[in-house]
Amino acid sequence: MSTPALRRGSVAIVGVAETGMGEAPAGTHPVDLMGQGVMRALDECGLRLADVDGVFGAAMQLRMPTLAICEYLGLQPRYQDGTNIGGSSFMSLLAHAQAAIEHGLCEVAVIAYGSTQRTIGRANLQPPDPNPYEAPYRPLLPASAYALAASRHMHAFGTTREQLASVAVAAREWALRNPAAWEKEPLTVRQVLDARPVSRPLTVRDCCLVTDGGGAIVVTSAERARALRKPPVFVLGTGEATTHLTIGSMPDLTITAAAESGRLAYGMAGLRAADIDVVEVYDAFTISTLLFLEDLGFCPKGEGGRFVADGAIAPGGRLPVNTNGGGLSYGHPGMYGLYVLIEAVRQLRGECGARQLPRHVTAIAHGNGGVLSSQSTVVLGTSAAL
């Protein structure tokens, strides 16, 4: 979906926070995590709950997440949006919040998420939509869908298991620099290959973590953002695209809609992949990182495996990717897109300690929903990028 009416740099992210990452305290509800995230993100930037007049959110365990968080916090916003297109929802909601702010529908927007999937167990989550065409083959979803994409990429381009494993190893190396990451032990390519098989060719170490977690970001106009506590991170470009719902309907297992969402976001931002300092992409599976690096223009189609090999996206490599450890090693509470945005903002503000990148003027935050189904891309930048 094109967003030609949105103006480059018209809004900024001014507050970010995550809550309960890893394993939430006993008795915690998803809306608790959403509420805590909102309050922490507001406190970070110096705004109050009374300033919030736009509420945006998505969740796996709540049918009406914006109503739930508004009741929980006592909010009666002028505008709300609970669009759910999977893990890419939060990038899309950021674009929707920008549109709402530009058109005067709200002034201060919060975007929130919360999940206790680890605590309650995945078996107790809402079952997926019925699919009479794929269900008879008993796929282990979502892993089997991503395994299909990995197998096809290996067949078409000669991508190796070792190259896929190097994505997980790089994520772990970044996680070891992040005190908040769930995984604390080093990881090797051999350990990835020898781990428990999940869905051929993927092992458990090719798959994201299963954690609890919540959080929020605060968005407001560029003018108001400049007067707040934290350096504003401006939204330079956004783009959304979809190609399918079920993996059997994906037009090409090696090309995602990120090629289109990225094109739209770069176009609005007036930038190219070569101009991006910080790369944060949704890494539910090792093949995801590889596909998005290709489709977002960081390497040619089919070259992703060779591109990520030998530590190229790990600390010290030629392209820093998923600097918090990603969904593979930092945490993954079911819908990971919000945390991609949070890490990108913190990198641009220079707040990441041992994992902080020396160049941090522009960033890309890319979200994925469903089984490579919905893609949403955001280009962010500091005031130096305007």
Image (cartoon, rainbow, N blue to C red):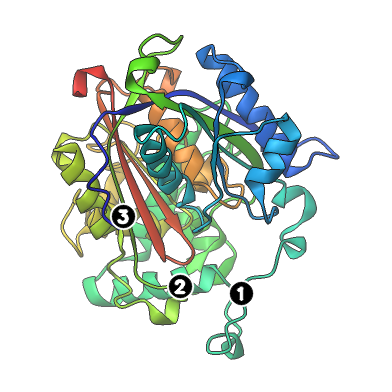
Q: Earlier in the sequence, mark 1 or mark 2?
A: 1
User: Judging from the image, what secondary structure is the residue with disc 3 in?
Assistant: helix
In what quadrant of the picture does the C terminus appear? top left
1 or 3: tag closer to the N-terminus: 1
In the visual, does 366 lie left or right of 276? Answer: right
Front residue (pair 165, 288):
288
The residue lying at 59 percent from left, 74 percent from top is 140
Q: Which residue is disc 1 drawn over?
A: 129
With 275 as the anchor, is 213 left or right in this view? right
Residue 261 falls left or right of residue 62? left
* Mark 1 touches mark 2? (CB < 8 Å): yes
* Inter-mark Cα distance, 3 to 2: 18 Å
Nearest the camera: 384 or 145?
Answer: 384
Q: Secondary structure at mark 1?
A: loop
Q: Position of residue 356 (x, y in %)?
A: 37, 22
Q: Position of residue 364 (x, y in %)?
A: 30, 39
**Amino acid on which the number 1 mark rests in the picture:** Asp
Q: Nearer the viewer, mark 3 or mark 2?
A: 2
Above or below residue 53? Residue 94 is below
Q: Earlier in the sequence, mark 3 or mark 2?
A: 2
Q: Residues within 10 Å of mark 1 (few under 14, many from 20)?
A: few
Q: Which mark is residue 245?
A: 2
- Indicate which disc residue 292 carries: 3
Q: Give the foreground label among 1 and 3.
A: 1
Q: Is residue 125 above or below residue 345?
A: below
Q: Type of residue at label 3?
A: Phe
